[in-house]
Image (cartoon, rainbow, N blue to C red):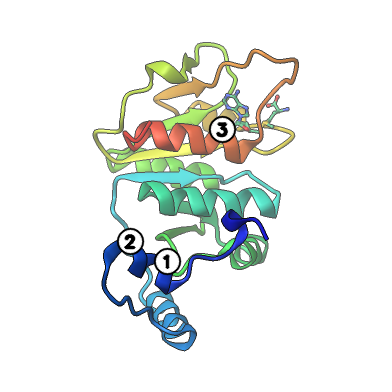
Amino acid sequence: MAPWRREARPDDLEEHLGEPVTRPDRYARAQLREQRRHHPRSCAGHLILAPLWVAYQANLGTLLRTCDAVGACLAVPDTPHYAEALAKGDTLPRRPHIHRVRRSKETWVRNERDRGARVVAVELADGAIPLVLLEPARRRTVVLLGHEHHGVPDEAMELCDVAVQIPMLGVGHSLNVAVAGSLVAYRLAGLA
Ligand SMILES: C[S@@+](CC[C@H](N)C(=O)[O-])C[C@H]1O[C@@H](n2cnc3c(N)ncnc32)[C@H](O)[C@@H]1O
């Protein structure tokens, strides 16, 4: 077996550090994971990815992992479809904070604006700024992501403070929505 395929063993580390290394056993690790699951994160109130129109479960799972990576929350409609998607895509020891959107999506976005959030639409739209000009978020920021076929609806675009687009050089018309959302999330989090 190629050396890079073999899982690292404790004695590999000992060789490096010159002292015995102990690892929690599988059972202890599973217990730790369970404990973390029962203490969901609270809202950091900074960055909220809102794939309110995204339909495909794989994309929602990917965005959940991005939220974890950049320290953002996720906002999704409070429906069985979204609950199922997150349950499937959730391979994390502890979930990011999830905002469940119970009223109309546009009302939720409007309420976020009223409480002072900046609303950023990720969309190929007239007047959208290129990703490179997007500054890291300095206040609570909601990021709208559109449906795989229909994009962000016009009514929601009207509620945005700014639209951002990711330039594309190829022949495809658009990126995968989870890729687009992740690029923007990294930028707003100040990590890229
Ligand atoms: C596959 S695209 C939707 C394309 C749809 N056919 C349209 O023309 O609106 C799904 C979502 O991904 C995001 N997206 C994909 N590529 C993008 C890009 N290059 N710049 C900004 N957003 C993008 C947007 O949020 C968009 O609503």
Residue ID for mark 3: 180
Q: Badge 1 is on which residue?
A: 12
Q: Give the camera-side residue of 60 and 120.
A: 60
- Give, as a three-letter code, the residue at label 3: Ala
**Which residue occupies the foreground of this view, 151 or 130?**
130
Q: Is mark 3 within 8 Å of ligand 1?
A: yes
Look at label 2 and name its amino acid. His
Disc 2 is placed on an element classified as helix
Up/down of 163 relative to 59, above or below: above
Residue type of the residue flagged with mark 1: Asp
Which quarter of the figure is the N terminus placed in?
bottom right
Which badge, 3 or 2, comes first in the chain's sequence?
Answer: 2
Residue 35 position in % (x across, y down): 38, 81
Tell me the tag on residue 16: 2
Question: Marks 3 and 2: CB-CB under 8 Å?
Answer: no
Where on the picture, by quarter, is residue 151?
Answer: top right
